[in-house]
Amino acid sequence: MASMGLHEGRSDAELLKLAMAGEESAFVALYERLKSGIFRYAYYMTSSVTAAEEVTQEVFMSLLEKGSTYREERGDVAAFVFGIARNFVRRVRRRERIYWPLPEDDAVERLAASLILEPQSLQRNLARGEAVEQVRAAIASLPDHYAQVVILCDFCELSYADAAVRLACPVGTVRSRLNRAHNLLARKLKPMKSTETLPASGTEGCLI
Amino acid sequence: MNCQEFHSYFEERRERVSRNDSAEFAEHLAICGDCSRWLASQNRVRTSLDLLRQSAPGIPATLDAAVLASYRKRMGEPEATVSVGIWRMIFPASLRLGLAVAAMLLIAAVIFALRRPAVTTNNKPQVQLQPQVTTPVVDAKAPVPNHQNSVVVRKAHASTRGAPTTDKSVGTIASDIRGNSSPDGFRSLMYCDELSCGGAMDVVRIQLQPSEPGLLAAAQQSSNVVSADVLVGADGIARGIRIVR
Ligand SMILES: [Zn+2]
């Protein structure tokens, strides 16, 4: 798929229109722009490459179907596509009941101990698949609205502002959620003595 | 810098933070054990997230091909949809039903001809009726067998509510057809027994071209069009036919 150069100057919205009109190269260019973010989001949300593939494919086909309902004034195409992706991810998770098991306390304790006692082996320990899975499990154990911001900001590498658009949240809410999520992760990976209060679990006016 | 400012400073920055980042920051770290521990835990989280990010699989090579194939298929679909739509416009529902009945008649007649070659009837083999079927008319008011316990006619009209629906009645008709004796003028189109001709049947009126051999006489009695009632079972297969005079 190499149609990027041909449409380099075009906006996502223009590409979408052309793609819907049957211009394959425009579709390919749009796909190349957006696929990585969608795939990564789906992968981290489902913890499954297969599910992420399925979601990505469904998202682009759905985009062609629903593309006519896209309104530029409501946001960029990437945000529109993210909305579709989020619905598909939810569907896949419901269907396959894909979930990350809550981290076992002793596994997290072991990881935390290794990080404290052997700081020099931090890299080595975390590089191990088991350790990575434990971190993943810790993320999965977060409330959904925290996991979403972690995945968008830390893994999909969106700015706070872009994540805010995706989630229809104020930027400040995204930032505070991310910080709370990091605090929770820090606790899960190493229980802390701090008396930080648990964050509220409301939606705070956000989509999720 | 106090503790709150220390936290804010860290939270504003997406990347890992060290004591070398700012003199104020380093000063507070030196005097505040809580913030020092908190910073260590936060940096550990960021390291963990980095490693998890690095461990993520790449996009499978098959995905691109699959998405492109889906796109091409999808873009090809509208043509197919249009062609189906045109086909439906050209052949309205009534005509499609007629063709279906004609096909059923043909099959039934062939089966009948093969199974009962020795039966002598007044009519030519029904196989010749089929190709000229033009406009089928499902006529609720078509004369149905007029005896009390005859065909169970299923129609949309409420007037047929009184039609008997007992197995006995169906059996009677099936028996009649089976024996090729047709008190109601229905001629068997297939081998019938309790099993194959049981159950309720529809009477479908169709119109036939009078040019068909054997239909000329009937045509001369009325107009140029010859009508026939066809008994159709619940399975859609025609069981009997009679020319409407
Ligand atoms: Zn402090």
Image (cartoon, rainbow, N blue to C red):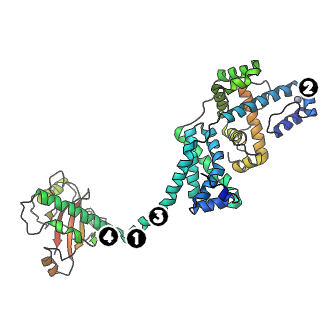
Label 2 sits on residue = B30
Residue B172 in the figure: left or right of residue B236? left
Label 1 sits on residue = B89
Closer to the observer: label 4 or label 3?
3
Sequence-first tag of 1 and 2: 2
Q: Name the amino acid type tagged 4.
A: Leu
- Badge 1 marks a residue whose secondary structure is helix
- Badge 4 marks a residue whose secondary structure is helix
Q: CA distance from mark 4 to mark 2?
A: 91 Å
Sequence-first tag of 4 and 2: 2
The residue at 76%/46% (across/down) is A159
Packing grade of label 1 (10 A; few <14, some 14-19, many >=20) is few
Q: CA distance from mark 3 to mark 2?
A: 73 Å
Ligand 1 shows up in the quarter that is top right
Sequence-first tag of 4 and 3: 3
The picture places residue A10, in percent across and down from the top left corner, at 69, 60
Label 4 sits on residue = B95
Sequence-first tag of 1 and 4: 1
